[in-house]
Amino acid sequence: MGTGKSKIDACPLSLSWHKRRSVETAAGRRESAAERAGEAASCDTAGPGGGGTEAGEPEEARAQEKVPEDEAGQDVFLKFVILHAEDDTDEALRVLERLQNDFGIRPGLIFAEMPCGRQPLQNLDDAVNGSAWTILLLTENFLRDTWCNFQFYTSLMNSVNRQHKYNSVIPMRPLNKALPRARTPLALQTINALEEDSSGFSTQVERIFKDSVYKTQQTIWRETRHAGRRQFTGAGKVAQW
């Protein structure tokens, strides 16, 4: 299967982060938003003199008001995420833009846009379980990448073990550098792939990305997150007691 050198590291696609301006722009928007939020917080807590926090305000209360940026971002359940080889970041971005702009399937994300500095397995879990569909970008590079091989096997197993994720893994052959059908791994040959160069591509997209499926998965995702938060809060109260 994958004979290439493994690309598993602390930030597997960090080098590709700067390949496209759209990725940099997205990061800039997040940074600017964080700065504006910080300035607003400073103004709110300043006294008549313009500096410092209000006297007697508990530190814990101020800490609870601050929501980490990455945690807030996780409250968005994505329509799809694209798993791709590091060298295919540009192609993944092109596919992302086409699905969002031409078909209105949004929000979406490519794996290169997952937070750097986190464990790759955590990013993979958030990407697969935080979206309704997982698109595997089948290219020559994808097949050679050991990390990509791990990604698609993990995604397939997740779709088998979780009933609501059934049929959520979508192999896709893009217009550029598509992997030939004869070289497609056996595990993926049993799944109908999206063929971007096919005349029936639009029909395939409409048949797969249905709002009803998305809403069902979104509901389950929210219930799971709320249950996890309640359990975490309960454990914290027991520990304090």
Image (cartoon, grey):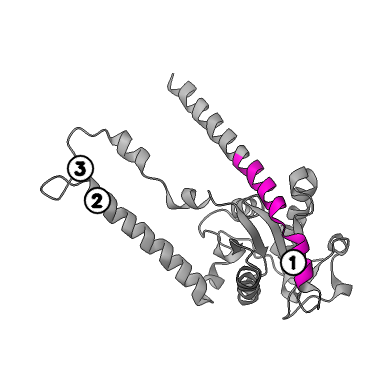
Q: Mark 2 is on which residue type? A: Ser
The answer to whether 178 appears left or right of 91 in the picture is right
Residue found at the very far left of the displayed protein: 49
The answer to whether 163 appears left or right of 110 in the picture is right
Identify the residue position indicated by label 1 in the image.
205
Residue at point 24%, 47% (across, down):
44
- Residue 87 in percent (x, y) is at 64, 75
Bounds of the magenta segment: 202-222
The residue lying toward the viewer, choosing from 184 and 193, is 193
The residue lying toward the viewer, choosing from 38 and 220, is 220
Mark carried by residue 42: 2
Tag 3's secondary structure? loop
Q: Earlier in the sequence, mark 2 or mark 3?
A: 2
Q: Mark 1 is on which residue type? A: Val
Dot 3 crowding, Cα within 10 Å, few <14, some 14–19, many 20+: some
- Above/below status of 89 relative to 75: below
- Residue 241 in percent (x, y) is at 44, 18
Dot 2 crowding, Cα within 10 Å, few <14, some 14–19, many 20+: some
Q: Nearer the viewer, mark 1 or mark 2?
A: 1
CA gap between label 1 and label 2 equals 47 Å
- Residue 73 in percent (x, y) is at 50, 53
Q: Does the magenta run of residues contain 121?
A: no
Identify the residue position indicated by label 3 in the image.
53
Residue at point 88%, 61% (across, down):
190
Residue at point 19%, 39% (across, down):
54
Quarter containing the N terminus = bottom right
Q: Residue 38 appears in which quarter of the rendering?
A: bottom left
Q: Mark 3 is on which residue type? A: Thr
Q: State the predominant SS element of the stretch in magenta.
A: helix
